[in-house]
Image (tube, rainbow, N blue to C red):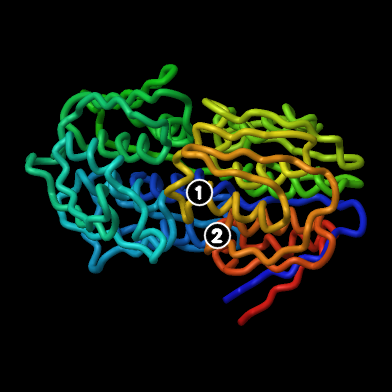
Amino acid sequence: MTSFVVEPATGPLGGEVQVPGDKSIGHRALLFSLLSRTPVTLRGLGGGADNGRTARAIVQLGATIERDGDLLRVAGRGVGGLGAPAEPIDCGNSGTTIRLLTGLLAGQGFTSTLFGDESLSKRPMRRVIDPLTAMGARIAGATRGADTVPPLTISPAAGGGRRRLTGVSHELAIASAQVKTALVLAGLYADGRTTIREPGPSRDHSERLLAAMGAPIKTRRGEVVIDPSGWDGELAIDAIGVPGDPSSSAFLLAAALVVGAREVGCRGVCINPTRTGFLDALAAMGASIAIDNRRTDGGEPVADLWVRGEAPALLPTVIAGDLTVRAIDEVPILAAVAARAHGTTIVADAGELRVKESDRIATTVSMLRGFGVEAEARGDGLVIEGAPGPLRAARIDSEGDHRIAMAAAVLALCADGPSQIDDVANVATSFPRFVEVMRGLGATIQILED
């Protein structure tokens, strides 16, 4: 087992960081490159294990990948040219990989099987399987309670020709970029129009990139439409730039906020409005984060984010509704920041966190309590009683969840002695250089291997 041992901070943090490429955009850049009729050069792709699973998957489906320094060159197969994988596709710990591939493979003329590690094998899949089945997809999986979990076997749909599926209208009960993208990909192989409506905003990286590649996609508030009628069936793009991951930057900015900073900067971070809920939540808590050098990279808005000065007196807040959707991955680190606020912070409408790498509501509460913070789990969220004094040094079990591990490492900087965070190997799925970067900012972290 891999553990972190984190010493309390002895002074403010300082430094500039280029955070890893955004994992969500990276998955899509790789998968959509498989569908391009032209070779695609990818720049800025992160080195996390999750993106690596998608890269290996597209090779199994017929793509070739060559590395040229920091660039990847992908020669895809085009929309109609995917090849049957010779063996089941291992999605590792990546829920995005398995859900997006399920949508893509639902319209193919061959059988494929998707599986993952122990954690992924517990993740619910009915929310993507059911709407795909309504389009004519044939997907079988294992049963876990009332849900379906991996491994998934996807067989050719009954329809003939390239349009094996049937376009239908979907009303999603929960806003989900993964489910939406799976249905969009299936819609490329469907006869007729596919419409997806969501109750609130979710990440729109797929819509932006597919539109740039020539997909028959239209968007308006709360709705995405795929209509292949009259489409030539081709997607193409020469290059895709992957901007910095806002979720990774959130841990570094939070560390600077709770400890204080001479100056901590994260350069080239994606500030797509569907991803900046954590910035809005921090602003509501009284944090000041400077957003400089706004620009566009790879069709996405990008900027440099800075924290400067002493740790501010943080305020409690309520994170709910659309704000929760736009900050869903950052809830554990926002909870860590809330532990340093003066008062009660409430997180609601976060039921999706129950079925992540861990039950993130439960593991976040357990992590906070380990440091002596009063916290309570609720059905779809949690309540945190902030206390700005020194925290109790702790030994935290992250339960293999990379976001819990990193949030605990940040909070440990405020403890009254060394803290140990166990089961942290999965940090490599999203932020392989996390410890190195934190050390560069001034934190003292050791890695233990048991």
Above or below, 354 against 316 in this view is below
Residue farthest toward the top in the current orientation of the protein: 220
Please name the amino acid that badge 2 sits on. Answer: Gly
Above or below, 171 against 91 in this view is above
Under circle 2, the secondary element is loop
Give x and y (percent) for residue 103: 28, 43
Please name the amino acid that badge 1 sits on. Answer: Gly
Give x and y (percent) for residue 346: 62, 33
For marks 2 and 1, give the one nearer the viewer. 2
Give x and y (percent) for residue 113: 23, 60
Q: Nearer the viewer, residue 212 or 408?
A: 408
Judge left or right: residue 192 versus residue 118: left
For residue 317, which quarter of the picture?
Answer: top right
| Quadrant of the drawing holding the C terminus | bottom right
| Quadrant of the drawing holding the N terminus | bottom right
Q: Assess whether mark 1 and mark 2 are in contact (beta carbons under 8 angstroms).
A: yes
> What's the mark number on residue 48?
2
Judge left or right: residue 58 versus residue 288: left
- Looking at the rendered structure, the number of numbered marks drawn on it comes to 2
Give x and y (percent) for residue 22: 57, 46
